[in-house]
Amino acid sequence: AAIGVSIIHGELSPERAQAMSSRGRPAAPGKRYSAAALSLVFHPKSPKVPTFRADVRMFSLGREDTWYGGGADLTPNYLDEEDAKDFHSFWKGVCDRHDASFYADFKKQCDEYFYLPARKEHRGIGGIFFDDIAGSRDTLALVRDVAESWMRSYRPIVIKHAQEGFKDEEREWQLIRRSRYAEFNMLWDRGVRFGLLSGGDIDRIMVSAPPLVRWKYDATPPANTPEAEMQDVLKSPREWVEAGE
């Protein structure tokens, strides 16, 4: 498990300015910025307990603009549909307290962001993810609500599965799945890339990576197995909450 608190400021590098501009936030190299983030990640020892990642963050550019982001997502090794439905229903409830359109939007952003294009699969079963929301009193209320809700979404799942036994081959599958998690962090995670380009402490930046992974060539599970079921969901994300729920 890791909990990170980051408060940084400086001048935008050319790479960071280009990355921001490509996402519709025009920025020039050398512009002063400040950023703050609170994040946490749990990588349980048991393959029956999913990994959980969550964060909230703020970015200010000069004195003109401030944006917020955040979210929470679940990465199981084995699919438990009840867990998936409960997790997404919980976060829909949080979103609905602020805007009924938020959940569908944030769920879509989560599925799109936590994606490994070379593998053509998603990192987990998603959750919510939002970025670049303009600062306001309503935005700050949303961000605070998300952060204060993290453990209420995850703790029941941990309690449900923590005492379940597991086999060596299930542990092996967990380590293979965690190699995908590490792949995403190193290749695609914007927060990791921002930290590295900003000259941050690499140990602090990489602290969210799994403690152990297994790299295996062509790690395709046999058909009609729990591992294959999980793989299928990662290839094609589902809608876990029915319309109107």
Image: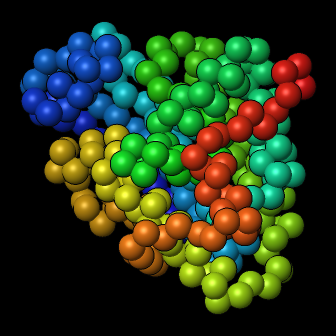
Question: In the picture provided, is 159 more to the left or to the right than 198?
Answer: right
Question: In the picture provided, is 50 more to the left or to the right than 15?
Answer: right
> Where, by quadrant of the figure, is residue 70 drawn?
top right
Does any portion of residue 179 appear in the rendered image?
A: yes
Q: From this viewpoint, which residue is outermost toward the bottom?
A: 168
Q: From this viewpoint, which residue is outermost toward the front?
A: 223
Location of residue 183 in the rendering, given as x and y in whole percent from the top left corner: 37, 58
Classify 23 as above or below 11: above
Quadrant of the rendering where the C terminus is positioned:
top right
Location of residue 197 in the rendering, given as x and y in whole percent from the top left corner: 18, 45
Q: Nearer the viewer, residue 133 or 65?
A: 133
Q: Nearer the viewer, residue 161 or 153?
A: 161
Question: In the picture provided, is 101 more to the left or to the right than 184?
Answer: right
Classify 190 as above or below 76: above
Going 41% across and 76% down the picture, which residue do you hit?
216
Does any portion of residue 148 appear in the rendered image?
A: no
Location of residue 103 in the rendering, given as x and y in whole percent from the top left corner: 70, 25
Q: From this viewpoint, which residue is outermost toward the top?
A: 64
Going 85% across and 28% down the picture, which residue do you hit?
242
Location of residue 222 in the rendering, given as x and y in whole percent from the top left corner: 63, 70
